[in-house]
Amino acid sequence: MNLLLGIGFFVTLALGIPIAFVLGITALVAVIALPNVPLYLIPQRLFTGMDSFPIMAVPFFILAGNLMNAAKITDSIIEFSKLLVGRIRGGLGHVNIVASMFFAGISGSAVADTSALGSILIPAMEKERYSTAYSAAVTASSSIIGPIIPPSIPMVVLATIANLSVGGLFLGGILPGVFIGFGLMGVNYVISRRRNYQKIVEPIQWKVFFKTLLATIIPLLMPLIILGGILGGVFTATEAASVAVAYALFVGFFVMRTLSLKDLPNIFFRSMVLTSTILIVFAMANAFSWILATQEIPQKVSQYILSISTDPYVILLLVNVFLLIVGCFLEGLAAIMITVPILMPLVTQVGIDPMHFALIMVVNLMIGLITPPMGLCLIVVCGVAKMKIGPLLKEIIPFLMVEIVILFVITYMPWFTLTLPRLFKLH
Amino acid sequence: MSGIREGILKVEQSLQNLMKWVLFLVTGTMTLVVLLGVFFRYVLKAPLPWSEELARYLMVWGASLGAFVAFREGSHVGVTMIMDRLHGQTAIVLTRAAQFIVALFMATVMIEGFVLVSKIRGQTSAAMEIPMGWAYIAIPVGCLLILMEALIMIFFKGDQSPEKRGESL
């Protein structure tokens, strides 16, 4: 039976069938093979998987991010970042990274970050004689901060599956996200010195400064509204996300005045189509994980791994390496949905904190977005920069290395992940 | 034969255009309903009993219909590194096989989805007290649309494989 499941899973995966259908097909084959299980269990699991109010934060965060993006808030974030860090050597590289950190506060997705910032900053960096590959590498490696600093779509999904506090995860992501940002800026500085990449020299005009400040701060109040609402115990995450949509509409129509009514149908339509690609995986994974549970796969995996070691440090090392490998082949969200039901019982059994582990998992699998062969951000950035993936891989290595080092630092120093959630008593 | 092909592709195209407006309305209503719920609960202190449930069912419908659009555009993420390396006859045969597997899967879930809807006949939802079938039927309807699209891809769209890949997170 387990062999059948394994073969079904990998054959359909290799055929290039979307991961959502791979999970569903595997579940269906298992249900057919199991005696006394009606086939309508599959549509039932699909429905109950999607019929969830907590997961509705996903479409709302996507919608809010898309609205903010359509309102051209990206431009003012970049201008503001230029004023903040443009005058350090490697200026535009730092701008790219810092803008990613700000952008992370209005979008919960790395791919959105890659295409929104990349399409503006890569041409700008090329003009300042940064190589295309280097510009693309900075863009892709910093975009993974998007889902680490709140709001975050992977964290909403993880919190829903593992029954954790979304607010706690959101808070826990802040320090690791900022840490990664500073780490990447360090790499950019060292490489810029070696290659003589310049800083921005044009003088600061104070009039422009205050205008930019205002145009950046108003949109960036959004994450504060979300976090404040959730942490104050006022809103659920989904309600906070819906308020974020309302706020984005308000900013777009009345503050920036860059949004027009005729843009709305397409933004709403696109946001739901993107949501559906996530929700369908979520629904299919709901059927798939039922099979895993009935076949006691999580217990078997736990037993096997615990027979190697029961030391939490060793387990964390093994799991991290395993997830980094998984991240090379599976897209982050799908990986979370498949592996959480298997790994969560294992790590809690050896006394690892579930919230800490969830945050490690998010950081780890987001790094997977820039590892070949299946790195979504790499694919997207190649499209934006109109380049082949080969030269990009060489340039991304130092950034990737620093991110992996930071991953392990966070893994073994729970201070980074748990300080803020503890401060707000969400842990 | 080519007349039938044109006709079917035309219908399929207009279905896509229709979806744009349907999904706009579904998503817009879902947002409004949740905001209304927030307003009634926190401002008027008189929570609406039905807002959360209605929003959930709208989301299930939105995701089921959106999945069809995403399938048509090839936006569902998969692992394509093996298939990308293949060329010629092998690639065509294996792509057909993959589409056929998806079609078969969707047909099964669609049939079982309708079975499920007929089984829960008479059940009503907790808050709005509408028939549960109205919500559940989103699943087989979504499957029907994807099944149809998969068959069109196999028989009418030749090897024009979806170009756009990887619109996700």
Image: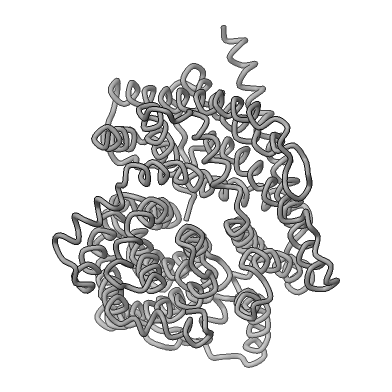
Q: Is residue A296 visible?
A: yes
Which residue is at a point 35% across and 77% down the rendered structure image? A184
Q: Residue furthest bottom?
A: A206
For the view shown, which residue lies furthest in the front direction? A36
Identify which residue, A51 or A363, lies in the foreground: A51
Residue B89 in picture, x, y percent from top left: 29, 20
Question: Dividing the picture into quarters, in which one does residue A304 lie?
Answer: bottom left
Q: Using residue A231 as the reference point, say whether residue A162 is left or right of it.
A: left
Q: Is A11 placed left or right of B50 in the picture?
A: left
Q: Does residue A216 appear in this view?
A: no
State the image quarter where residue B20 is shown: top right
Q: In which quarter of the image is the N terminus of chain A?
A: top left
A58 to A404, vertically: above or below: above
Total labels: the figure holds: 0
Relative side of A427 to A138, left or right: right
Q: In which quarter of the image is residue A215?
A: bottom right
**Furthest residue to the top?**
B1
Is residue B58 depicted above or below B121 in this figure? Answer: below
Residue B91 place in picture, x, y as percent: 31, 26
x, y (%) of residue A255? 76, 74
Instruction: Name the one closer to the observer, B113 or B93.
Output: B113
